[in-house]
Amino acid sequence: MPVNRIKPLEQHFEKIIVGVAGAALLGVLAWQFVGQGSKVKVGKDEVDLSGAYKPLEATATRVLADLKNENPALPDVPAEKIKDVRADFDARYRGPVAPAPQIAGAVFGRGLETTAPEAIKAGATYAAVLLPAPRDPVGHAYISTLDPNELKRVPELAAFVPKAAPFDKVFVSVQASVDGRAIKEAIGKDPDGEGPMSPIPSKWWERATQVLRVDLLRQELLPDGKWGEEKAIPTLPGNYGLTAEIEKSIRTTADMQAVVQQAAKAQELILRPEYYATISGEEWREPALLAADVDPAQIERLKNDLARLDVEIAAIEDKINKAGGSKPPGGGRNERDTGSGGGGGGGGGGKGGPQDSQPSVPTTTPSGPNIAALQSSLNRNKALRVKAIEELAKLGVQIEEKPTSVGARETVRPLAKPFLEDEAVKLWAHDITVQRGKTYRYRLRYEITNPFFARQAVLSPEQAKLAERPLVASPPSEWATPVPVWDDAYYFITSAQERDSLGRGGKAMAELYQVHWGYWRKASAEVAPGDALTAQAQVPDMEKIVAALAVKPTDETPGERGGRPGSAPPDSSPSPPGEPGKTGEKSEKTPMKRLTLAADAIVLDVNAIPGSDAGSGNAKASSQVYLRDASGRIVRRTPEGDRGSDIFKSISRNAQMGEAAFAPKEPKKPAPKPNLDTPRPPPVDDHGGGGGGGGGGG
């Protein structure tokens, strides 16, 4: 049988396949080097792959230039097509979300607010909220020296104080009160009883009513004797306040909820904002207390009592801690002998008297002091301290409370009634924009959360305006008594005597006043016709005092710093020696310096008032002094008129306080303290005793 041979094609088939594949690969490689390369389509053009990003980069550069162009070319849009996008959005956002004009519930904030059908009725009609006005407004002008650290904390203050120390500042505080219960009644009452109007649903206001702003309104007395335009005074720089910008940002009930939460935490700062920390000057007190003429000496006495009690409490607590707090055997009571008296010889012992009905006196134990005696003294001092704090609170002074354990201090905050339950909510505000020498009058109003705000969906179209503004303002109070603001300097004629019968010339005594480091400083001079009013005053060298105290910047926030109206500063705040209401020890000798006081006036003449007997040389008789002031006017002054003026009484009183604050005093010897480690002897038992001895036994 013949043998089949393999054909050449079959024999070399694999080689042919490998050769063709290799040739194709070589062709591809060759195409990469000698061909046109890959291209991509960018927009309408085809570009090499390597340059695909260049058109994108050029486009991005052009768009960026258009964004930075401050004067771009605006498209020509017909006026009829221009719409207020924001107004359109607000209308759609606040508009109804259902086909019916009103629904019983609406989405507020984060969830669905559900109420009983009788609380929110479709088509219900509500009355506008009419709040009670604040009552009993009173204002008072103050002067003090701001702590330099306050200018670092609140840079905006620089516009209201001198450019260099001392930073003496005159300001006015205005106080009023309002009945919180009347506010609650005004919001929640049924406006017409059985009539068609409905009371405001309680869920709209009971937990959301907060005072968001207290407005201080002011008018200035013009030269013609009329009052100028009413002006709203802005909140103190650096203090919490609802500004107009924040009010505009409240657009929904969710926004309102956030503001209410913040206001609830800051109600004290909203209702009764703090004034700034000061280092010199009369301590701030409520204007109402100043109007009631509360005695500052009484406040100082209570503060001294409080300081003494603090020292004693700390000493007793230290003794208790060192003793380990253990009580002596028998519960701290001394077991007294109630048995028979000792028997004598022939006389025999009489029966002991009855047990003493008075409390027993604790004694020491071999291990240390009597804990019961210490604890009794501690409780007694704490009770006295609470009483002193309550008395100071009645006088409008808040005191820094020292906890029972030795440690950091915390501010005493009396547990105040809820705002809507307090019949006498105090409000006050401060005005640092006053100008020296002018007279102002003030009144207050407050603004609370609007219970209707952003609830257009459940209000009838006729009442939609009730929901527009987030706040509801009260009527303003009556005008307080006008407050004159002190000028830069004053002079007063305190006595005068015309030329006597011996030909001696007329003379007068003048007192000059000028503010220096928070107090009015006084200098006296005897003047005669032709004399200018000038004198030298001895004043504390506050530059040296402050330098010695090493005033350092603080990082305290408004709610943490000292200097709150009516409160004493914390222990760490520097205070000039001897200043009332301030901490710090008094130096043996306060450094003093001379200060020249001058008034731009010249004495022209001193003569008798017609009808008086001043011509007899009687210094107490009525005389008058004529002076020429800086403007060339002739001014007539009398001692009786100057000394009897309210401004003289106020300024001279302040100057006396300034002198007393820095007057060197002899160091007082500490009062002897009872030795708490030594027990007092028990009271003598007069009810009986042991029998006397008879004849001795043999």
Image (tube, rainbow, N blue to C red):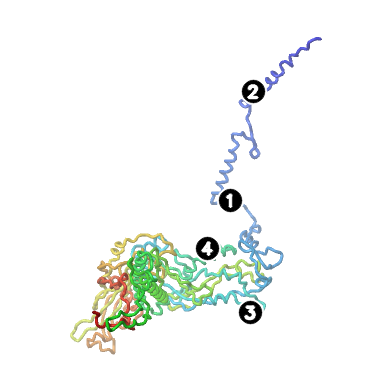
Q: CA distance from mark 4 to mark 1?
A: 32 Å
CA neighbours of label 4 inside 10 A, class few (<14), some (14 to 19), many (20+): few
Residue type at tag 3: Asp
Residue type at tag 4: Glu
Residue type at tag 1: Ala
User: In the image, which disc is placed on residue 73?
Assistant: 1
Tell me whether the residue at label 2 lies in contact with that at label 3, contact meaning CB atoms closer than 8 angstroms: no
Query: To which residue does mark 4 refer?
Result: 245
**Towards the viewer: 206 or 331:** 331
CA neighbours of label 3 inside 10 A, class few (<14), some (14 to 19), many (20+): few
Q: Which residue is outermost to the front? A: 698
Q: Where is residue 515 shown, x and y percent of the image? A: 33, 70
Query: To which residue does mark 2 refer?
Result: 26
Q: Residue at 29% across / 64% down in the picture?
A: 545
Q: Where is residue 116 shown, x and y percent of the image? A: 66, 70
Q: Of marks 2 and 1, which one's residue comes earlier in the chain?
A: 2
Q: CA distance from mark 4 to mark 2?
A: 75 Å
Query: To which residue does mark 3 refer?
Result: 192
User: In the image, which disc is placed on residue 170?
Assistant: none
Disc 2 or disc 1, which is closer to the eye?
2
Label 4 SS:
helix
Label 3 SS:
loop
